[in-house]
Image: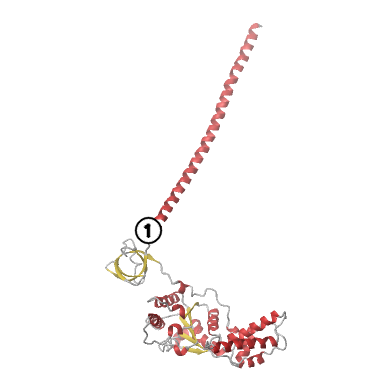
Amino acid sequence: MSSEADETVSGSDLVSNTDPVQKALDNLAKDFHELSDKSQQLLTEKIFLENELSQLKKRANRLEEEISNIRSPPLIIGYVQDIVDKQAIVRSSNGTVFLVSVNRRLDSDKLKPGSRVALNQDTLSVVDILSDSWDPLVSNAEIIESPEIRYSMIGGLDSQIKELREAIELPFEKPEAFSDFGIEPPTGVLLTGPPGTGKTMLAKAVANSTKATFLGLVGAELAQKYIGEGGRMVRELFEMARQKAPAIIFIDEIDSIGSKRLDVSTSGDREVQRTLMQLLSEMDGFESLGDVKIIAATNRPELLDAALIRPGRFDRIIEIPLPDLESREKIFGVHGISMPMSNDVDLRALAKISEGFSGAEIKSVVVEAGTSAISYGRKSASKSDFLTAIKKVEDKRKEAISNGDGFYN
């Protein structure tokens, strides 16, 4: 009995002795897992910080490079005129011509006369070839969105519209027909007539009617004060038109650069004449215009140089006169088509009492009549509104004429 009791006691002592060891092992295993998880977390953070450090270094390098570029001296823009024995004859932006070296890393095949290049400020050597860039005035001349003017919105100019479409649109639509007849299609059309008769509206209607690229600007914008600037802009305008052909170039108020050449002494007049000579060369020079047509408008055709209006440059001169009775009635109908009018409004009678009015003045009459009706709270324009409007526009015409401004526009 005593031996069995001793064995029982010794067994319980063994169990009690192993419990602290097991607990210690469990604690060690727990600590190991915690340390392992923390080590993995720290390793992940290390990789993240290393990646972030690498990105910051790259950004620092880019900023250092940007600072270096900002601190570097500016480059001069020039144009290559000729290539001579791996050297280039360039014209700098101030007009001076130099024979300079060319950076060997540049593609010599892309470097050719007319190329736009960057020149080192100190040595003027060619360091880069730039893409062709149009003058902002030239690039902004392109009409991206087609004007909302249609031929049906122009009243009283049916014969002029027919002539214009034959000269401009027909060569685009049937080029093979001109080849079959062995004739060259018309190059340009000159629109003449008093202000407000619809010259610019006709050009807008052409832009709306055709799918050709439309480039429109005012002649005065080509008259620059620096030597060669006007001629360069004319050259770029026609180069852009050739690249975007079929294209139509519209030059409004062409008399500002196309006046007769006289013996002048001022530098400004000489620069205008250089611009005119460049325009003459582009219109009928060695390089064909192809699918490029020209429309010009002027109020003073008698001032234009004879070389500009000869056949081959402007093949058709279309006069846009002041509207006659029938035309005035049509114009009243065109501008008042969506205006509510009372029964006492007779467009024929309005046309009779508005003799001498231009299309722009008739449009002004319709606007004035509508404004008058709105100001009095009426739902439609009455005869009295139109009579008052006609008198107001006529008074403005007389005032403009008395001030020496000619036609009221």
Q: Is residue 363 above or below residue 77?
A: below
Q: Position of residue 388 (x, y in %)?
A: 66, 87
Viewport quadrant of the C terminus: bottom right
Q: Residue furthest top?
A: 2
Residue 177, given in percent of the width and then of the height, sits at 47, 85
Query: In the displayed image of the protein, which residue is found farthest to the left?
Result: 85
**Visual colour scheme:** secondary structure
Q: Is residue 170 left or right of residue 82?
A: right
Quarter residue 158 falls in: bottom right
Q: Residues within 10 Å of mark 1 (few under 14, many from 20)?
A: few
Residue drawn at the location 53% of the way across and 32% of the way down = 35
Is 19 positioned to the left or the right of 88 in the image?
right
Give above or below for 386 relative to 123. Answer: below
Residue 12 seen in this snapshot: yes
Name the residue at 30% across, 63% down: 123
**Relative to residue 22, is residue 171 drawn left or right?**
left
**18 and 159: which one is in front?**
159
Residue located at (61% from left, 14% from top): 13
22 or 103, which lies in front? 103
Q: Residue at x 61, y 12 (%)?
A: 10
**Is 152 or 92 nearer to us in this picture?**
92
Question: Can residue 358 be seen from the camera position used here?
Answer: no
Residue hosting label 1? 72
Residue 338 image position (x, y, % from top left): 67, 81
Residue 334 drawn at (x, y percent): 63, 85
Q: Secondary structure at mark 1?
A: loop
